[in-house]
Image (cartoon, rainbow, N blue to C red):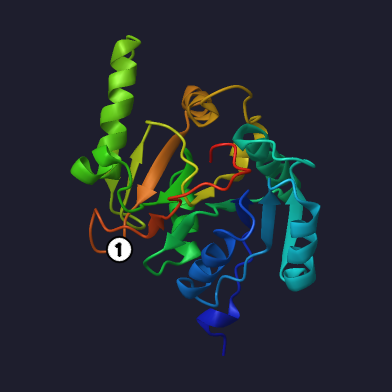
Amino acid sequence: MTTAVDVVDTTPLIILSNRKGEYLPQAVLSIGEHTSDSWAPDVHVVDDSGDPAWRALLLAKFGDRLTVHAVDDHPAGYTRAMQRVWELGRELDSRVFLLEEDFVFVERFEISWLHDILDANKRLAQVALLRRPWYPVELARGVMDAQQQRVDGDRKAAGRAHTTWVWHDWPHTYRSHDAGFTCNPSLLNKAVFDIDWPDGKWTETVMGNTLVARDYRFAWMPVPGGRHGAFTQHVGTTRGTHSKGY
């Protein structure tokens, strides 16, 4: 007889890292504590520390459980690191769960829930797990409302139409929108890797605008049973001296 645990999902997990041991261990520990044995991901660390000794240490300790991908031989910054993530996504040729190292999980989740949503809504570029408020405006309004307010303000200033947000209750509760892409913990549609990660500033916003122009949408998923519960928490309160700003 086959049990749920016997059906193993190996959806790749890409962890974006640049601060060596400052956050990475707790991120890995956290995701293990909040997912079931049915997800045994193919783990990839995209490392922007620029430190070969650190990468060698990771491989020596955990090389049987993960693969390390260097961005460059010096810290290259967020844009180049995300371009390396995108290169890797193309190589993996599948949906990918993206996790920046300075997030931890605060609620249990199943990777299958996110696959269910992408299967049901082909327009979605990603399904992001709702996180706890971090910025001051989010503490007052919540993550989704704060994003809607900010992007609507930008679009009004540019003479564009406001964002569109829709709640869905099948196959799980989630909220789709066209406000833009996020690098918060999320499952990414395989098709997004067909679009090059851009150069320049505010590349997350540029990527979101590019995806919207191609008729993609995005989604936030709250904890089952409501519309506001958060799965993750941002813990990046400090930056390493080698950080380039992410």
Left or right position of 196 against 203:
right
Residue at 52% in and 24% down: 206
Q: Quadrant of residue 109?
A: bottom left
Residue 150: image x %, image y %? 30, 28
Residue at 58% in and 60% down: 24
Q: Quadrant of residue 89?
A: top right
What amino acid is labelled 1 in the image? Answer: Pro
Left or right position of 41 against 145:
right
**Closest to the observer: 14 or 187?**
14
The 10 Å Cα crowd at callout 1, few under 14, some 14 to 19, many 20 or more, is some
Residue 155: image x %, image y %? 33, 17
In the picture of the structure, the residue carrying the numbered disc 1 is: 224
Residue 103 vertical placement versus 70 (above, below): below
Residue at 60% in and 68% down: 9
Q: Residue furthest left?
A: 140
**Closest to the observer: 219 or 215?**
219
User: Is any atom of residue 7 visible in this view?
Assistant: yes
Residue 44 vertical placement versus 9 (above, below): above
Residue 220 vertical placement versus 205 (above, below): below
In what quadrant of the picture does the N terminus appear? bottom right
Residue at 30% in and 55% down: 173
Left or right position of 143 against 87:
left
User: Is any atom of residue 163 visible in this view?
Assistant: no
Residue 168: image x %, image y %? 29, 48
